[in-house]
Image (cartoon, grey):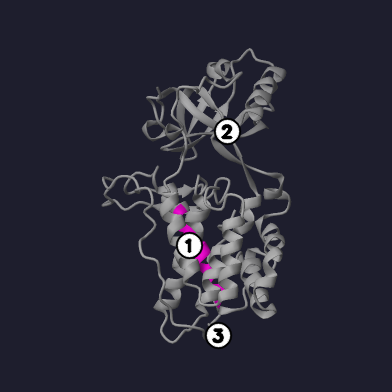
Amino acid sequence: MKKEFISSVLPNAVVDSLFVVDEVTLRNSSNKKSYISCTVSDRTGRLPCKIWGDAGMSESDIEGYYNALSQSQGSIFRIAGRAALYKGELGINVNDGIVYLSKPADSSKLPDSDFINSPVDIAACKKQILALIDSIGDEGLRTLVSSAVTKADGFFEKPAAKGRHHGYFGGLCEHSLEVAKTALSIEESLSGVRLRRDLLIAGALLHDIGKCQSFEKKGLSYVPLPEYSLLGHTATAMMYLSHYRAFTDAETFRELLHIVQSHHGEHGETMPQTAEAWAVHLADNISAKIHEVDEDLKSVNPGESVWGRKSDSFVYKSASCDDTGGERGAGDNGGGNFVSGKGSGSEKKSQRSITDCFK
């Protein structure tokens, strides 16, 4: 039975427990010595882990352990080491404990629920997304979005990213729902601004659909496919959506593709040019950035300002911050289905991109 979880790991504490291992890479330290970098996780979170081995190990020994780990990504291993802070980020260092990493632990009697890292109530997310799709008034566009979402490989289960934001089971559907809700709230909040609600929902829900072709299930984790870095999720999204172009007219389909193509703003190939594209781009940044800042703040003491590795910016936790609120409940997606709208409309003033937070 698993007794120690990620959420209970403290700096300088001895760690000896079972975790899922993924994101395995072989690296060189500043003194040219090889070490293994990976991520360890359970249902309470994820931590970086560096496996150095003991002093007497050769380069070939380290490579042997690397091969064993990389071939079994997504499996459960015994991680025995010590927790430490490095540049403000908590992680685990493994030295002598490397001897436990030649093969996965026996997980036959372990419940998967202890090891799957996800704060998402996937069923609740799916229900809200399908309700949003059903609220699209244009029948052709509604059919396109419904077909694209329900036929995509793992839309409701896969992560939205490898490490930055929503990088857990169900992260893609949670992020897509957040972007749709935020984009709709933009439309509801701005006086005198009218956006085409159907196109807004379609673009928000499909902007990251290419990530379904960027990850594959391996053990109890999702690992990135070569497409993740070689093609990027925007290119794969454009190719995937081309199969559904016959469901709507050429103009609507072109504007939908523009939203998908331009949702990275100044960091992409194409800048947003329509009001709907800008709304989705900004909503995407909000969902990603706030999650990144929130993750960084979890390791910050009240009254401190530190450099956040996920948000790639300084983050500050108020001295009066109350940390007794507990973890976010599964399926806490903000409530509401945002099924009302103001109809189609005209142009919106151009706005600048907030930041690059799509990786």
**What residue appears at the point 41 percent right and 46 percent down from the top-left corner?**
119
Along the line of sight, which residue is nearer the eye, 226 or 306?
226
Where residue 279 appears, as percent x and y from the top left, is 52, 72
**What residue appears at the point 65 percent right and 49 percent down from the top-left corner?**
214
- Left/right placement of residue 113 relative to residue 238 reads left
Magenta stretch: includes residue 289: yes
> As shown in the figure, which amino acid type bears the numbered disc 3?
Glu
Where residue 215 appears, as percent x and y from the top left, is 63, 46
Q: Which residue is mark 2?
A: 219
- Residue count near mark 1 (Cα–Cα under 10 Å), binned few <14, some 14–19, many ≥20: some
Q: Which residue is mark 3?
A: 347
Where residue 330 appears, as percent x and y from the top left, is 37, 48
Disc 3 element:
loop
Q: Which residue is mark 1?
A: 130
Give the spatial CA distance, label 2 vs label 1: 28 Å
Q: Are marks 3 and 1 in contact (CB under 8 Å)?
A: no
Indicate which label's residue lies in the foreground, 2 or 3. Answer: 2
- Left/right placement of residue 263 relative to residue 84 reads right
Disc 1 element:
helix
The boundaries of the magenta stretch are 276-291
User: Which residue sits furthest top?
Assistant: 56
> As shown in the figure, which amino acid type bears the numbered disc 2?
Gly
- Considering only vertical position in the picture, is 107 above or below 226? above
**What residue appears at the point 53 percent right and 20 percent down from the top-left corner?**
105
> As shown in the figure, which amino acid type bears the numbered disc 1?
Leu
- Considering only vertical position in the picture, is 223 above or below 104? below
Disc 2 element:
loop
